[in-house]
Amino acid sequence: MEFNVTNHQLCVGDIHITGVASSALFLIGDVQTIQLSSAFDTPPESLIVGPFVPLAPKG
């Protein structure tokens, strides 16, 4: 994959990060090369997907 970016002037004020996902990249500024990798060590049979049930409101 080739990803080309043309950078212009950058001015960063305040940054507020509320949460980080299990796989995330946060970058300010320039970089020549980025190499990302991930590992998933849970067996596929233990992965539970749906059905999604909404939470009951408190009250």
Image (tube, grey):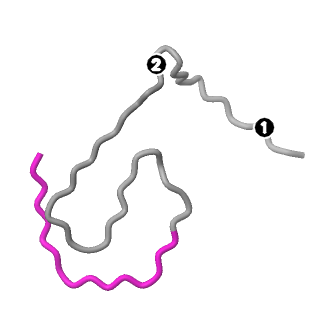
Q: Nearer the viewer, residue 28 or 3?
A: 28
11 inside magenta stretch: yes
Circle 2 residue: 43
Per the image, label 1 sits on a secondary structure element best described as loop
Circle 1 residue: 56
Amino acid of disc 1: Ala
| Relative vertical location of residue 36 with respect to residue 33 in this rendering, above or below | above
Give x and y (percent) for residue 6.
12, 71
Give x and y (percent) for residue 51.
59, 23
Crowd around label 1: few <14 · some 14–19 · many ≥20 (10 Å): few
Q: Residue at x 85, y 45 (%)?
A: 58
Q: Residue at x 17, y 80 (%)?
A: 8
| Relative vertical location of residue 48 with respect to residue 20 in this rendering, above or below | above
Q: Which residues are magenta?
A: 1-16
Amino acid of disc 2: Pro
**Count of all numbered marks drawn on residues in the image:** 2
Q: Residue at x 42, y 84 (%)?
A: 13
Q: Left or right: 38 with respect to 18? A: left
Give x and y (percent) for residue 10.
26, 82
